[in-house]
């Protein structure tokens, strides 16, 4: 399973969705084209996990999450729309465990 993260149920952490991985120094390629920007985004979180806040800057959408039940999997999706009219969605899979 791609995009798997592990989280303690008491942790309040940030989870980035980097649409400009290469530009931001975190990957081999950019999804966003040159001069393309994110004009809107929606974060959806499975019940049981709490979305505390979210923000977007320079092609990275960050979701701050808390909660979750030990031993359960949760999905967090980030759907973006760009100034070029492109729409895409990425999903993180978060497993809750005591750390």
Image (cartoon, rainbow, N blue to C red):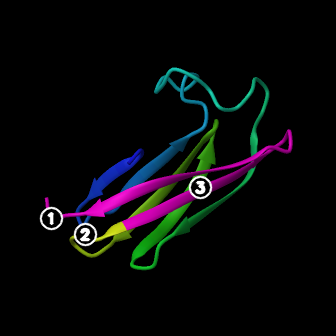
Q: Nearer the viewer, residue 75 or 39?
A: 75
Magenta region's main secondary structure?
Answer: strand
The answer for how far apart the CA atoms under marks 2 and 1 are is 7 Å
The residue that disc 2 covers is 9
Q: Secondary structure at mark 3?
A: strand
| Upstream in sequence: badge 1 or badge 3 | 3
Q: Tell me whether circle 2 and circle 1 mark residues in contact (CB < 8 Å).
A: yes
Q: Residue furthest front?
A: 1
Q: Is residue 91 magenta?
A: yes
Residue 40: where, in percent of width, then height? 74, 54
Q: Is residue 60 magenta?
A: no
The answer for how far apart the CA atoms under marks 2 and 3 are is 21 Å
* Mark 2 nearby-residue class (10 Å; few <14, some 14–19, many ≥20): some
Q: Secondary structure at mark 1?
A: loop
Q: Nearer the viewer, residue 72 or 40?
A: 72
Residue at image coords 86%, 39%: 84
Segment tinted magenta in the rendering: 74-99
Residue at image coords 27%, 76%: 69
Q: Residue furthest right?
A: 84
Q: Nearer the viewer, residue 92 or 10?
A: 92
The residue that disc 1 covers is 98
Residue 89: where, in percent of width, then height? 63, 51
89 with respect to 63 (left or right) = right
């Amino acid at each position: 399973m791609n995009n798997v993260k592990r989280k303690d149920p008491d942790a309040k952490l940030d989870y980035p969705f980097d649409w400009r991985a290469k530009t931001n120094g975190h990957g081999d390629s950019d999804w966003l084209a040159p001069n393309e920007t994110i004009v809107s985004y929606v974060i959806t979180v499975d019940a049981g996990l709490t979305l505390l806040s979210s923000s977007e800057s320079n092609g990275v959408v960050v979701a701050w999450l808390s909660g979750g039940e030990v031993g359960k999997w949760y999905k967090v999706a980030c759907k973006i729309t760009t100034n070029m009219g492109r729409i895409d969605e990425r999903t993180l899979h978060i497993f809750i465990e005591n750390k």
